[in-house]
Image (spheres, rainbow, N blue to C red):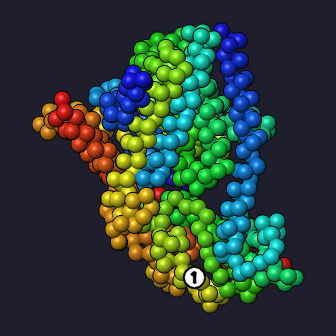
Amino acid sequence: MNNNLRLFTRGIIKENPTFVLLLGMCPTLGTTTSAVTGMGMGLATLFVLTLSNMVISLVKRQIPDKVRIPAYIVIIASFVTVVQLCMEAYVPSLYKALGVFLPLIVVNCIILGRAEAFASKNGVGASALDGLGIGVGFTLSLTLLGLVREVLGAGSAFGVQIFPGGGILIFVLAPGAFFALGYLLALFNKFTAKIR
Amino acid sequence: MEYVLIIIGSIFVNNIVLAQFFGICPFLGVSNRVETSLGMGAAVTFVMALAAVAAYLIQYYVLVPLHIEYMQTIVFILVIAMLVQMVELVLKKVSPPLYQALGIFLPLITTNCAVLGVALLLVQKELELLQSVVYSTATAIGFALALTIFAGIRESLELEDVPPAMRGLPIAIITAGILAMAFMGFSGLV
Amino acid sequence: MIFSLLAITFVSAAAVGVVYRVTSGPIAAAKAENSQTSLRQVLPPFDNRPAENVRTVVVDGAEAKVYTATSGDTVCGYAVETLSRKGFGGEVVLMVGFKPDGEIVDIEVLGHKETQGLGDKIERGKSDFSVQFRGKNPATFHLSVRKDGGDVDAITASTISSRAYADAVNRAYLALKQVSNE
């Protein structure tokens, strides 16, 4: 049990995909104009990551080594399409906000990376926990980055206005994505350096 | 005139890295040296132009007639992966020196979201075949441009005294932000 | 080797196909709901389905869709879906509702790529820009920004977006005239 818990929490801080491994940077920068869109992207990735991890772990013995990467890509792309279709049907506004970044989950290096590094070597349960942990870590990071940009850039949090009159516009524009991520990374480094 | 607008628009105004956030991984990963960035830029340009043609043909001659547009993501990524493999094989046979120069970058391109992103965008924008090729080539040049400028800055950044917490990627990402601001200045052009 | 890859592709494609079947209904419903909502927002109360009563006309190189709304047996308004390519970031797509005499009821932005925080103030709810068109008749209200000698108050620092918006509204009016003259 303890071991499982460690498997799950590892992705949140110690191997946080955004702040430690620096993977999946395109959606991280592209979809975090607000806390809600960042969270939506994180959850979509969490879903794809967990399920593809489980399926790949299930069929790993049936896939010949030579064609494993194309096979993984097919499995991941199918789950991405499922997410796309479901979002378009049930949350069309989020579907519109995420736009082309939704199909681009396919090429998110986190997912293929976990398939190759973890799911292809471990059992279904462990792979599911690993996917969940990394996915939660990714979702938390994206929500945090989205929240910071939304508060600074639009003066609101999760769509609720907290400062009247808006904010520093640059933070919701493209350069602000880089600034917010750069400073958050530096803070994260500072914080974890102290712990060590 | 229309083509000039597409070219300027996709190189400067809607720069794929600095304004649209595609291909950030290679942008941060292989931008330590100007030479390697040029190599990566050339490889991406090559693959992206081919991928645009392939994506166009598949979308309008396979997916639309069969009414399976929803399979777009799966088909496109497979085609891009295949294309990259093919380019690698052909280059190895036909032009070993070019393969030597670009070879190590090619496997990285499959998971470069810029290539898939451009393929999806040109369908979304409903471009015609020639427009698609011009658009994707110009976009790739924009990618190479951003990558090279960034590599140049990072080369001199290495000599600077940076606070410990900011060393490495944080300062590089903030630099990219300043570069993005500079590129915003182009937005009045088109 | 090839067999197992084919098998995986086949199973995945079949699974996606099933999901597509299941979601295609809700997707169509969500889209119809969306256009019905924007029609309700820009038109006076109606009791038909304007989405099924549509005519396409071409105004100055761009298509415009004219939806006719009826209440009882009389035409109570027209909604025109049109776009302008003069925007800062690309196309600005609007749905403009008119009374039969040409007076603007309300306008809804269906899509745009204008700059966040500046040009996106053309959206209803983000600024009072769109309110100034309500109740105006383009026959007397000149649809271009004041800088160009018209009657539209542009958004500060977003003249281009405002111009595109006014251009799209003007196209909508031209499309309406084209339809009502026939």
Q: Nearer the viewer, residue A177 or A164?
A: A164
Q: Vertically, is C73 above or below C22? A: below
Residue ID at (48%, 32%): A132
Q: Vertically, is B115 above or below A40? A: above
Q: Nearer the viewer, residue B94 or A111?
A: A111
Pinpoint residue A87: horizontal percent, then vertical percent: 62, 47
Q: Specify the amino acid type for callout 1.
A: Phe
Query: Which quarter of the picture shows residue A187?
Result: top left
Residue ID at (48%, 21%): A126
Query: Which quarter of the picture shows residue B128?
Result: top right
Q: Nearer the viewer, residue C152 or A49?
A: A49
Pinpoint residue B29: horizontal percent, then vertical percent: 35, 29
- Look at mark 1 in the image and give the residue it sits on: C133
Using the image, name the chain to which the residue with label 1 belongs. Answer: C
Q: Residues within 10 Å of mark 1 (few under 14, many from 20)?
A: many
Q: Does residue A173 show up?
A: no
Q: Vertically, is B128 above or below C48? A: above
Which image quarter holds the C terminus of chain A? Answer: top left
Pinpoint residue A9: horizontal percent, then vertical percent: 38, 31
Q: Does residue C49 show up?
A: yes
Q: Find the residue positioned furthest to the bottom.
A: C140
Q: Is residue B45 left or right of residue B162?
A: right
Residue ID at (52%, 17%): A123
Pinpoint residue A52: horizontal percent, then vertical percent: 57, 27
